[in-house]
Amino acid sequence: MYNVDIESMTKPVVEEQIVKIEENTESVAQGSLKPAEQVAKQCSECQAEFGCGVVAASEQGGCWCEDLPAIIPLDTLSDCLCKTCLAKVIGAEILKQLNAAGSPKARLALAEPFRHQKELVENIDFTIEDGRYVFSEWYHLKRARCCGNGCRHCAYK
């Protein structure tokens, strides 16, 4: 989740984010964080408790948030969010960026780096309406081709 949108940030802000990342990595490497501190988080949006693996990522091979599209500038979020709230924020940001991209070619280019992400995430790749899965335009762009089923959010109409 350490994706930095450098174009929208000034050099001092980018350098500050790099320092924060390095400090977090050093704390983990030195073992100065206690296991309970490594995973106990409360979502700043819905107040739900959840396990955060960023602090322990070096031991576990990564955090669940690294499986989501890293498309939000770091300075956008004030603190960690649970998976549901983070997916909603990322989904909204994706829509914003797709609308700003304009052309179909630019929209495809935006999704291309995320095609390797195969796990479908609610509020990013799909929503559930009346018990049915509705795939998002983002899902179709990552898929990179039309399935021919006349989907509501088909990017290839």
Image: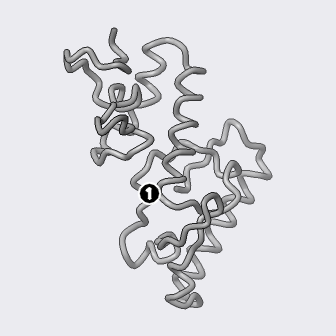
The quarter of the image holding the C terminus is top left
| Residue 97 x %, y % | 57, 28
Q: Residue furthest front?
A: 130
| Residue 69 x %, y % | 45, 45
The local secondary structure at tag 1 comes to helix
Q: Along the line of sight, which residue is nearer the eye, 137 or 63?
A: 137
144 is higher (above) or lower (below) than 85: above
| Residue 139 x %, y % | 35, 32
Query: Circle 1 sits on which residue?
Result: 66
95 is higher (above) or lower (below) than 120: above
| Residue 124 x %, y % | 43, 40
Report whether 130 appears left or right of 104.
Answer: left
Residue drawn at (28%, 29%) of the image:
143
Residue drawn at (73%, 56%) of the image:
15
Label 1 neighbourhood size at 10 Å, few (<14), some (14-19), many (20+)? some
- The quarter holding residue 18 reads bottom right
Q: Along the line of sight, which residue is nearer the eye, 53 or 40?
A: 40
Task: Give the residue type that dot 1 points to.
Answer: Glu
